[in-house]
Amino acid sequence: MAQSATFPWKLPAACAAALLAGGLLGWLVHGHLASGVALVAVVEVVLLLTRIRHQTQPMMAIPASASPLQHDRFMTRSRRIASSLRDLRNAASQLPDAVVLLDQEQHVRWFNHAAEDLLGLRRPKDRGVLLQQRLATSDLSDWLRDGTGEPLNDVAAPGHPDSQINVSMLPFGRRQQLLLARDISHLNRLEQVRRDFVANVSHELRTPLTVIHGYLELIDPEDVPELAPVLGEMRAQSKRMGQIVEDLLALSRLETQHQIVDERVPMAPLLATVRKEAEALSQGRHQITLESTAEADLLGSPKDLHSALSNLVSNAVRYTPTGGSIVIRWQRTPDGAVYSVSDTGFGIPASHLARLTERFYRVSSSRSRDSGGTGLGLSIVKHVLNLHQAQLRVESTPGAGSTFACHFGHARVLVPGGRDEG
Ligand code: ADP
């Protein structure tokens, strides 16, 4: 400290003393001051320039042996790099996504304008603060503390509670982290518009379809024998349209529902019903077996679980040729319990498996339509399972058959007389 405080006076004082001495020497030798002062001044400038160059060398990492030309090139390159860095930083600060640069302990090192807007950070006061503390009251707090590295979707933006954001954390540089947050409010709004549209159209179609179907049922084909085949086809199609509308309405309801009213769902009667439905649909064309070893019930929505479990059985019947067999299983596992339906049907090529639960996704459209499918069954299954924090796993071999398994966690499994012991 003392050195840096005195340094600014030492150098000018030494220079002034040297100039005075040079002047005196010039007066003594040549009879006038100027020649001595000029000589000393030139020597001082050369010495100062050498000193400045010497001090900047380590900073710029210019080799001591560098020629003036190399030195100039080096300086030009350094300026270009500095300018590119400035451009990069300016570009990052204008990004529509929030970007926050964090050190190893999650202290804020830098953030852009969108981070001020979405995360509520303020400069300069939030530079250097611990992000987890700064956002302690927000939905991001637990995620920042746990540091799982998994992206967090659809949470309220701390700086804008009406907006929803997706957040992710990326490793960056030397043990630094980059927090990225994207405003997804407009996507959510679009998704809501789509959901409302589908729900409204389905609702509007329901009544006219019921009326048409009702009138078609009233017409006796024997009264109009020449129209009998047409009448049969019209009835089948109006029934199919009615089923599509019902499935779309069921999906809309499941999509907007984020929680269910939990009830004990006794599995023995549910499995018996599902089996009876399968036999009714099969009409003796398949061998249907029920293997229940779990002796456990489920916690959830009876209506939705019935819909999901019977959808899988109905698919097994519809996609298994006559003479095939279907096994319905209910078993305990170390993780909870599994309901599965195995068939010896057509099977599904591996390339289709990932998309099966998409709306209207069909491996074979003609086979689905011929068997009375709407293309919405597995979407409904997926949504019901999501609401029960359960997972659908599919294994299939083309030409050999498929197994659709619903995996329920311990929290959803009830043993006779109480909650699951796990
Ligand atoms: P769909 O009403 O067409 O059956 P789903 O959503 O229930 O609609 O099923 C989607 C597609 O998955 C079906 O069209 C069919 O191609 C295939 N699929 C579903 N279950 C089975 C199964 N058990 N065996 C073979 N294919 C199946």
Image: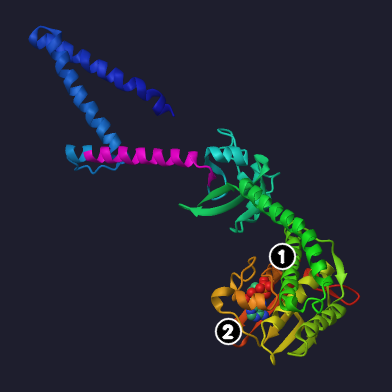
Name of the residue lying farthest toward the top: 31
Seen at 25% across and 31% down, the residue is 51
x, y percent for residue 146? 65, 56
In the rendered view, tell whether residue 329 sits above or below residue 65: below
Seen at 59% across and 34% down, the residue is 122
- Tell me the quadrant of the picture where the C terminus can be found: bottom right
Magenta segment main secondary structure: helix
Residue under label 2: 398
Give amino acid for label 2: Pro
Crowding at mark 1 (Cα within 10 Å: few <14, some 14-19, many 20+): many
Numbered label attached to residue 375: none
Seen at 9% across and 11% down, the residue is 29
Give amino acid for label 1: His
Seen at 71% across and 75% down, the residue is 230
Name of the residue lying farthest toward the right: 417
Residue under label 1: 383
Question: Which is nearer the eye, 84 or 379?
Answer: 379
In the rendered view, tell whether residue 70 sits above or below residue 327: above
x, y percent for residue 362? 61, 72
Tell me which label, 1 or 2, sits earlier in the chain.
Answer: 1
Query: Taking the image as four quarters, which one is ligand 1 found in?
Result: bottom right
Highlighted range, magenta: 73-102
- Whether 388 is among the magenta residues is no
Asked which secondary structure carries label 2, the reply is: loop
- Whether 85 is among the magenta residues is yes
Question: Which is nearer the eye, 325 or 183?
Answer: 325
Q: How many marks?
A: 2
Asked which secondary structure carries label 1, the reply is: helix
In whole angstroms, how far apart are the C-alphas of marks 1 and 2? 26 Å
Q: Is residue 8 left or right of residue 100?
A: left
Please indicate, yes or no, whether residue 399 appears anywhere in the rendered image: yes
x, y percent for residue 123? 56, 33
